[in-house]
Amino acid sequence: MPPRSPFSSSSRELHVVVLGAGGVGKSCLTAQFVHNEWIESYDPTIEDSYRTQVQVDGRQVILEILDTAGTEQFAVAMRDLYMKTGQGFLLVFSITSPSSLSELENLREEIIRIKDEENVPMVIVGNKADLEEGRVIPRAKGFAVSQKWGAPYYEASARTRTNVDEVFIDLCRQMLRKEDETAEPDEGSKIDALKSANSKRRRRSKFRDSTHPRCVIL
Ligand SMILES: Nc1nc2c(ncn2[C@@H]2O[C@H](COP(=O)(O)OP(=O)(O)OP(=O)(O)O)[C@@H](O)[C@H]2O)c(=O)[nH]1
Ligand SMILES: [Mg+2]
């Protein structure tokens, strides 16, 4: 017998892409979320993917998380493809790196251009919040960007695990909401809706015939 999948077959699958400049902490945030582990060393990513199951508001969700390369030489080749297939994006910068926030602007514009729509689930993450003494991006700046882009802003720390679950769960909620809004009703529910409309129509006409005779103009 083949081994049973640890994931329930009824779970929905959502594709998350973690984006941001090199060294801002994308891999560390992902490793904390998926494996509860802290990685002290820096090993630039080429591309890694993870699969994990989470519960969001009582719903089982399988997350496919793509941890992308921040380093320019690795980054560009696969970008179009994962921006197309990604359903939600964690846009990560470091509060200790001034250029890392401005780099997100280009990434966001590219996502919107490639997907050809503005309404894309996103969360902005100011990582390395434990390094308060090295902060160069004020909290207010993060909030201003968040308001401008209409996406939530969290300050997080992969080191202390602050807001790690929260950023992924917020993104999941946005993705689920979007799926619910755009989902076509399945065949079963279409038939149910049709039956219910027909029976209402029948009930209405019965009602009219028996107790409310049509108005007859003499
Ligand atoms: N103090 C502190 N250090 C962090 C935090 N997150 C990551 N780091 C450190 O920053 C370095 C880079 O972290 P990574 O997660 O590898 O960065 P990345 O964004 O994945 O980098 P690329 O794969 O090159 O794009 C590592 O040495 C981490 O230990 C954090 O929240 N606080
Ligand atoms: Mg990485």
Image (cartoon, rainbow, N blue to C red):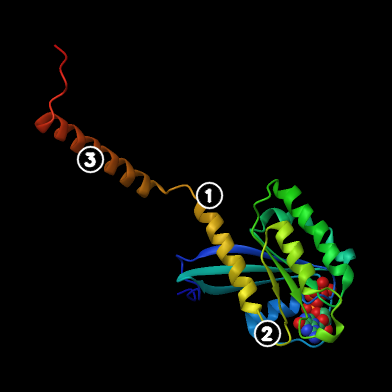
- Residue in front for this viewpoint, 159 or 210: 210
Label 3 sits on residue: 199
What residue type is disc 2 on?
Answer: Arg
At x 13%, y 11%, the residue is 218
What residue type is disc 3 on?
Answer: Ser
* 10 Å crowding of disc 3: few (<14), some (14-19), many (20+): few
On the image, the x and y values in percent for residue 47 come to 77, 69
The CA span between labels 1 and 2 is 33 Å
On the image, the x and y values in percent for residue 89 come to 69, 63
At x 74%, y 57%, the residue is 148
Secondary-structure class at tag 1: helix
* 10 Å crowding of disc 1: few (<14), some (14-19), many (20+): few
Label 2 sits on residue: 161
At x 73%, y 67%, the residue is 143
Quick check: 162 left or right of 207? right
Q: Is residue 169 above or below residue 132?
A: above
Q: Is residue 105 above or below residue 92?
A: above
Q: Is there a contact, CB below 8 Å, between mark 1 and mark 2?
A: no
Q: Is residue 135 visible?
A: yes
N-terminal-most mark, 3 or 2: 2
Residue 174 image-quadrant placement: bottom right
Q: Is there a contact, CB below 8 Å, between mark 3 and mark 1?
A: no
Label 1 sits on residue: 182
What residue type is disc 1 on?
Answer: Thr
Locate the N terminus and report the quarter of the image it occupies.
bottom left
Quick check: 74 left or right of 34? right
